[in-house]
Image: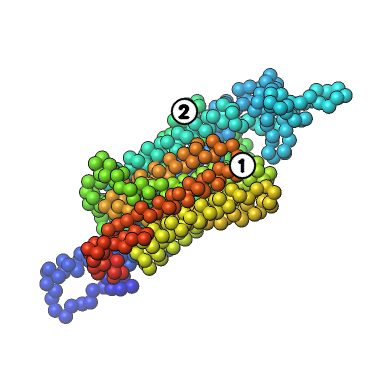
Amino acid sequence: FGSRFCSSHKWPKPWRPVPQRTRRAMAEVQAYRCMVDAANKATELPLLRIGGSMQENPHMRIFWAATSSFFLCFLAWFSLAPLGLEVAASLGVCENQLYPPADHRTRPAYVKFTNVKTEMKYCRYGANVGDSDCNPPPVGSTVDDRYDPSTLTDCVCTAGTECNRLLSDAATASVVSSVLMRLLIGPLIAKFGPLNMQCCVMMFGAIWVFAAAGIRAPWQFIAVRFCIGITGAALVTSHCWCSLTFAPNIVGTANSTMEGWGSLGAGVSQAVMVLMLFQPMTSMGMQADSAWRLSVVFPGMFLLICAFFTKILVCDTPTSRRMKASEAGDIDNASMRAYLQVMRDPRVLVVVLQYGACGGTVLSIFNSLATHFRSYFQLKASDAAMFVSVFGFMYLFAAALGGIASDVLYDRFGLRGRVWGQFLGLSATAIFLFAFGSVDNSQPWYVAVAVVACLSLAMQMADGMSCALIPFVRPQHIPLVTSLVGAGSSLSSALQGLCIYRIIDDDLLPYKVHALYVAFCALLSVVYYWPEHGGMFWGPRTEAAADATEPNPDGDGKGARP
């Protein structure tokens, strides 16, 4: 490291007394474990360099605090989803609890029921044309054994049942609260700082995760899921935190890596809540009702522990324990006037749409993929779940690759390189999504799996490139832009499900229509233009370019910095 970047640097002994003014200037020079620029933002991302005090290594403390808190918030956000059937059984809303099969043999949910484990049907001889009853036994049979209640699971919760509606309404409430909180948290970050807001989100989420253990009625389940959904705002806080900590040359890698690893909290919720908590408890003899209630206590404990250590060990920015409003950009960041000003910027609207086209698409595809493989390609539930898990765990590296690629393009071509990277990532996503919608079941299932692997890589790399671009859209309003982008992602996923996958009654066409939407969002990249940086096809204005190319202390010659 250079002398001003190395934490082990010691000032040489002067051969003569140092003037008081020089001593003060020397004391103001902060020695960090990471290389920094003139604004004390880290210009590197040494993941394993975690030693040092808060003053020596604030950058990596902030990175790991943002990543771990993001991970635990998403784990808590989705903690009740894998236990939905157990919750429904405890609340008595399963179809076979509300309508016992012995008294309601022709319930549509029973007539259409197929046990995915045994592949046995409730109707031994199939259902009639309108699914109103089971077909009678063959002629000559002396026993009317058309119904087989033994195939029904402990909690029948298929489409059209009260149970299914409850779980759907609870999931919708969770998304709605995350959208609302993501919109609100931007100004709050500018006013109170990312550290305080992240700790508040974790503590608030912990309270309602604990409250989930006491759910006794369906409305309470919906209300608790709504309140827990507020933890989804950790996405905005973590993005803003890293954007204020890392320099432009590495912020793409930092943001995308943080989001990729943090988003795994949602992916591992199935393993943590079911395989590591619920099933071991039931195998030891605990009742299912008690087991799921005790299981949800653990994510709440994790959040409280993380909030406590984050508050005492981490700071808002590398240079201050408590962030000043001016450090977040425009000092008016917390006002509604600033919010309206940001929303009028077409570049902000484009980045919201584009992040929804990659980050929102990840959620939409993740929700529909297992069902598509099971129903259209007739794969076993275990095989479909394995493919979906692989799709999710690609976040370990795919999003980070997108951020790294964006940083490389920025180093070579400036901000225009990031825009082109965004365009290419979304274009590749559209191509592979259209290709997936073109793979019918006359082809081997592994063809679809191969296309999904390429789609996952392209989509998550595009997600990482979007994370790298967000801090540059309006550098003076980072909290507000990040807030809008985060809210737009959740809203985009919900709208994609409602307007594409629910309306279009076809197995493949929804994916092709979705691909066209992603391609349209990719073409919007031509809207990006900055006077000092230019756009996709237009260079910067002469005067602004001259200002932007003035030498700056980190020596990369790009001048203007967010």
Q: Position of residue 544 (x, y in %)?
A: 24, 62
- In this rendering, does residue 3 appear at all? yes
Left or right of residue 3: residue 105:
right
Q: Quadrant of residue 432?
A: bottom right
Report the number of discs: 2
Decide: few, some or many residues near mark 1? Use Cα within 10 Å; few <14, some 14-19, many ≥20.
few
Mark 1 secondary-structure assignment: loop
* Residue 507: mark in rendering: 1
Q: How is the image coloured?
A: rainbow
Q: Nearer the viewer, residue 42 or 425?
A: 425
Kind of residue at disc 2: Gln
Residue 21 position, x and y percent, is 12, 68
Determine the residue located farthest toward the top in the rendered image: 103
Q: Are marks 2 and 1 in contact (CB under 8 Å)?
A: no
Q: Nearer the viewer, mark 2 or mark 1?
A: 1
Name the residue: 67% across, 47% down: 441
**In terms of depth relative to the viewer, which is nearer, 381 or 354?**
354
The answer to which quarter of the image holds residue 29 is: bottom left
Q: Residue at x 14, y 79 (%)?
A: 16
Q: Which numbered tag is attached to residue 220?
A: 2
Give the residue displayed 64% in from the left and 54% down from the top.
447
Disc 1 marks a residue whose amino acid type is: Asp
- Name the N-terminal-most of marks 2 and 1: 2
